Amino acid sequence: NFWVSEGCFHYLQAWIDFARLPAASHNRKLSFSGELYEVVNSRETGRNNGVGTLEWMNYDDIDKTLDQTQYDYHGGLQKPTNILAAIRRGAPSNEIHSAVIQDFRCWMFYSPDIWPTAPGSYGTDDPTNHGQNYTYFNDTSDLTSGLGHLALLPPDILTEFLSWLPDLKSYLALSRTSRMFFNSLTNTSTFNRVLRRMSKDPSRCLYWLRPVNALDGEVVKANEALFTWYNPSANDTQLESASPLDDVKFPWVGFIRACHNSDSMRNRQRIWGQIKQVEHAWRDYRINGWRVDRF
């Protein structure tokens, strides 16, 4: 048998894009749990004895930290980049301690459900002015300026195309192919619109930023933080159930920067990466069936 924590179980259900998985090659009717059991146990390599980790899973080195404690966490170290930089610039002890926490990747143990709040969102006199240092983007700018033949595509189709890139690194790499691409794709309104679309469904690279409804209290917790970035006025027309992430005025660029610096969101993205590995195995299972018959 194998064990999955309640949180990760709900993340599996929410983040695997079952709508885009092929139909199973067998005709047996299995529940989500039953099919997950077969996906995990029918791979060519099984679990590591005594540990329980899956040999085919890349755990981003968290598996090397199984024996660590709050006094001994050497297993997570990859490169002491931040530690060396802090020592070289003569940083005070508290900054060196923060560098140690980063290099030893202690963020892997943060709760993955603490969304960052906007700068200055606490203690301000005007609660509607949260995130005031960020631009409220609109959807009226010219997306196609400087894109050459790609400008022949309608702006909405081009935005859709860009939103299917596998990650933000690919988007930024595309923007560096020419000066015109850079000016067009890093335009804040364009970038904001693409980022919003990148979070639309489980097959796109930023969907993990959305809270999972099945986890008790996660939507409420997320919205408390998200509304510090954009708090719509009473005159704005939107559904009560709509996420601030879907509003065209939500400052995605500033929010993404904050998530990049958030230990909680970094850990959430790590879990997303592992679940996408399970989705890859699930797709193979649906197409090819059991790799090994252990049943």
Image (cartoon, rainbow, N blue to C red):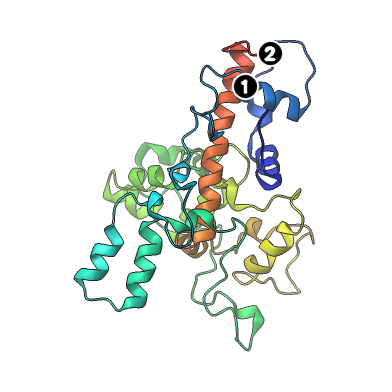
Q: Please say if 290 is above or below 154.
A: above
Q: Looking at the rendered structure, which numbered label has been put on residue 41? A: 1
Seen as rendered, the residue at the extreme front is 50
Residue 44: horizontal and vertical position, in percent? 52, 16
- Amino acid type at circle 2 is Phe
N-terminal label among 1 and 2:
1
Seen as rendered, the residue at the extreme bottom is 125
Label 2 crowding class (10 Å Cα cut-off): few <14, some 14-19, many 20+? few
Residue located 71% across and 74% down the image: 233
Residue 198: horizontal and vertical position, in percent? 55, 46
Residue located 50% across and 71% down the image: 134
Seen as rendered, the residue at the extreme left is 88
Q: Quadrant of residue 11?
A: top right
Residue 140: horizontal and vertical position, in percent? 54, 58
Label 1 crowding class (10 Å Cα cut-off): few <14, some 14-19, many 20+? many
Of residues 282 and 242, the one drawn nearer to the viewer in this rendering: 282
Q: Marks 1 and 2, how far apart in space?
A: 8 Å
Residue topped by disc 2: 295
Q: Secondary structure at mark 1?
A: helix
Residue located 69% across and 16% down the image: 24
Q: Please say if 270 is above or below 287.
A: below
Query: Which quarter shows the C terminus?
Result: top right
Residue located 71% across and 24% down the image: 35
Report the number of discs. Answer: 2
Q: Report if the CB atoms under discs 1 and 2 are less than 8 Å apart.
A: yes
Q: Looking at the rendered structure, which numbered label has been put on residue 274? A: none
- Amino acid type at circle 1 is Asn
Residue 127: horizontal and vertical position, in percent? 66, 81
